[in-house]
Image: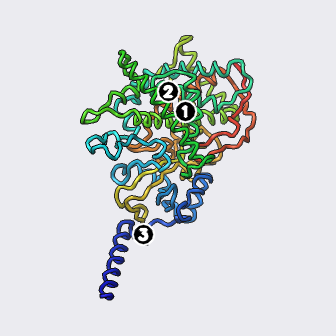
Amino acid sequence: MEILTLAVSFLLIALTFVFLRRRSGSADNLPPGSFGWPVLGESVEFLFGKPEKFVGERMRKYSPDIFKTKILGEKTAVICGPNGHKFLFSNEQKYFTAFRPHPMQHLFRSYKPKESAPAAAAPTSFKQTDESKVIRQPGFLKPEALMRFLARIDATTQQQLQKHCAGQSVVQFYPLSKTITLTIACQFFMGIDNPERIARFVKNFDDVTVGMHCIMLNLPGTIFYRANKAAAALRKELIAVIKEKKQAMAGGAPLHDILSHMIVASDPSGKSMPEAEIADKIMGLLTAGYSTVATTMTFLIKYLGLHPEIYERVRAEQVAVAEAKKAGDLLEWEDMGKMKYSWNVISETMRMVPPLQGTFRDVLEDFTYAGYTIPKGWKVYWTVSTTNMNPQYFKEPERFNPSRYDEGEAPPPYTYVPFGGGPRMCPGKEYARLSILAFLHHVVKNYRWEVIDPNEKVEGDMMPEPQKGLPVRLYHH
């Protein structure tokens, strides 16, 4: 009897071992790399080291095409280089789907019904809808919709620059950039223009942004604890905004913003999206439309302040645009097409200081890349760090050189992808382009500046920001 029991136990262990190997792929065929420490994996090195350093060291040590690691609690394959970018962008929904790291899942948690509620009550159609789908469906980010909103972007930018720069000799541009971008985002996504409310938003959004990629340690003083508190405060404030919007809509207010459309949206059974879920989706949209744009605006100011010859060329282009218009006229869609060199400068800023390092994908089924098998259930991390500063693709990568994007001089395909690519390309690309160009138009037309501390430390590796807020000495034209 004991022999039979031992035999059955051995057989069960063997079958379990075979099953697990099949689920995770052959260990011999996994990409090279290391899962790091138990539990933490390589999360500390990933979060607190320079992203290009983390990726570059492992590309040199293991493979320039792909390596394995464990970050933020997930076994992850990092696919590298332009070929990796192309493979990922070309196989969305075949091998990959969007994945939010666990800190983001917690901070932007969607509405979940109580366990006692009947299954039919669960708003499943909404639970499966991420923010990018929500804003693509009504067409808010299509050119024709953005054309109508451009005048508002332009007017708001002028008002904010006048409010915070007029008569000032020293200005911190990072806080100013955040105020401008969040004001525009609140108008675009929610149709609100309340300076006091927006001022309350700024600090909370900063904490949430930092907490999106962090170790989930919910103790007082930790990044995740602050992010949790900030998300709760934002959720409460946004639910108040939703209730106000519903009252306005009941009085006949038009549906001119994304929030209004979320409120009236319904699933196939006719159920509306719960307020808590709307708040979470709006929070995600505002975070995406705020922090990345503000970061690019800030470092754009820095690089123009450090390169007077580039500043002069940008200013000449923007003055020409202004002189072709009647005094007081707001920017129009055609004007933005004339800002080619200005966009080159913005592009080089995003290469030097990426506003977003990369994103994660969930692996839908086993696939093979560069001779290695990545199992279903793993995560794939895509990052600009594998190409942006690589001299193989960008000559003298440490040099700020907007002319590298001139016609006929463009970087090789899939080497410069600040907005991603394929079906998951950032839907807000055009929104970001218009916001940054409008900001650049007015700031160079009205001011020149000197960066007070050219060597100011940049903090935050996933979301870079100048330690002192980028103070500049401002001169009015």
Q: CA distance from mark 2 to mark 3?
A: 48 Å
* Residue 264 as seen in the image, left or right of residue 416: left
Residue at the image position 32 percent from the left and 88 percent from the top: 3
- Residue 347 sits in which quadrant? top right
In the rendered image of this protein, does residue 324 appear above or below residue 135? above
Q: Amino acid at mark 1?
A: Trp
Which dot, 1 or 3, sits closer to the camera?
A: 3
Q: Amino acid at mark 2?
A: Cys
Near mark 1 (Cα within 10 A), the count class, few <14, some 14-19 or many ≥20, is: many
Could you say where residue 100 lies in the image, as x and y percent from the top left?
45, 48
Residue denoted by label 3: 29
Pick whichever of labels 1 and 3 is earlier in the sequence: 3
Q: Amino acid at mark 3?
A: Asn
Near mark 3 (Cα within 10 A), the count class, few <14, some 14-19 or many ≥20, is: few
Residue at the image position 54 percent from the left and 47 percent from the top: 357
Residue denoted by label 1: 343
Could you say where residue 247 lies in the image, as x and y percent from the top left?
39, 20
Pick whichever of labels 2 and 3 is earlier in the sequence: 3
Could you say where residue 249 lies in the image, as x and y percent from the top left?
37, 19
Residue at the image position 33 percent from the left and 87 percent from the top: 2
Residue denoted by label 2: 186
Toward the viewer: 14 or 433? 14
